[in-house]
Image (tube, rainbow, N blue to C red):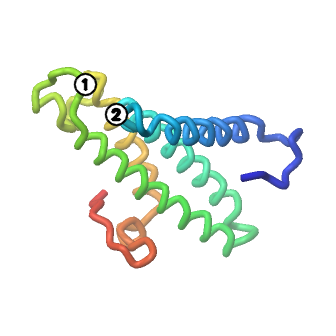
Amino acid sequence: MTSATPVGDAHPYLRAASAGVRHHTRALATQAATAPAVDRTHLDVLHAHLVALHRLLDQLQTATRPPHPAAGRHLATAGSRLWQAGAAVHDAFHLLPAVHAASADEQECHPERLPEGPPVLTICQRHLAAGHLVRRTTTPTDLNRPVHGHTTTCAQ
C-alpha cells in the first residue's frame, strides 16, 4: 500500500509504524510453514498497537468533530471497530496456552490485583485503561454493533 502523502511529511513515526506492521506481516507469511504464527507475546504487542491506534483515532475524532461532524462520526466509528478488534485480541491472548507452566489462577484476569499482578496481566492493565476511555466516549450499543452483519461476543 503506498501513500499519496509526501515522504517528508510531519508524521514520520506513523509511517514507520505502518512500515513495521507491513514488514511483520510479510515475515509471518514466509515463516508460516516453519513456525507457529502466534503466541501470547505476539498478541500482547499487537494489542498494544491497537490500543495506541484507538487513542490516536479518539484524539483525531475529537479534533475533527466540531468543524466536520460527519468526518468525526466516521472516525468515531473506526475507533469503535478498533476497540472491538482490541477486545478480540485480548480474549484470544487468554485462550492461548502460557509459555511457562502457570497455574490457572495466574492466567485469569483479576482486576483487583492488576497493579501488583504478574507480568502476564500487562495486557489486562492496558485493556482496562483503554476501556475507561472507550466508556467515556462510546455507548454500549456502539460497542456491540455488528460489523458487516456479524454479531460480536464482546461484552466490554
Please tell me which of labels 2 and 1 falls first in the chain.
2
x and y percent of residue 14 in the render?
Answer: 70, 40
Q: How would you rate the neighbour count of disc 1 (Cα within 10 Å): few for under 14, some for 14-19, many for 20 or more?
A: few
15 versus 5 height, above or below: above
65 versus 106 height, above or below: below
Left/right placement of residue 5 relative to residue 23 reads: right
Give the camera-side residue of 48 and 41: 41
Q: Secondary structure at mark 2?
A: loop
Report the residue marked by disc 1: 99
106 versus 56 height, above or below: above
Residue kind at label 2, given as amino acid type: Asp
Left/right placement of residue 69 relative to residue 80 reads: right
Tell me how many marks there are.
Answer: 2
Quadrant position of residue 23: top right
Q: Quadrant of the C terminus?
A: bottom left
Residue kind at label 1, given as amino acid type: Val
Contact between labelled residues 1 and 2, with CB atoms less than 8 Å apart: yes
Quadrant position of residue 105: top left
Give the camera-side residue of 123 and 20: 20
Q: Give the residue at x 21% y 38%.
A: 109
Report the residue marked by disc 2: 39
Give the camera-side residue of 115 and 8: 8
Q: Give the residue at x 55% y 42%.
A: 25
Which residue lies most toward the left here? 104
Quadrant position of residue 26: top right
x and y percent of residue 29 in the render?
Answer: 51, 42
Q: Distance of mark 2 from mark 1, alpha carbons?
A: 8 Å
x and y percent of residue 28 in the render?
Answer: 50, 38
Left/right placement of residue 120 relative to residue 38 reads: left
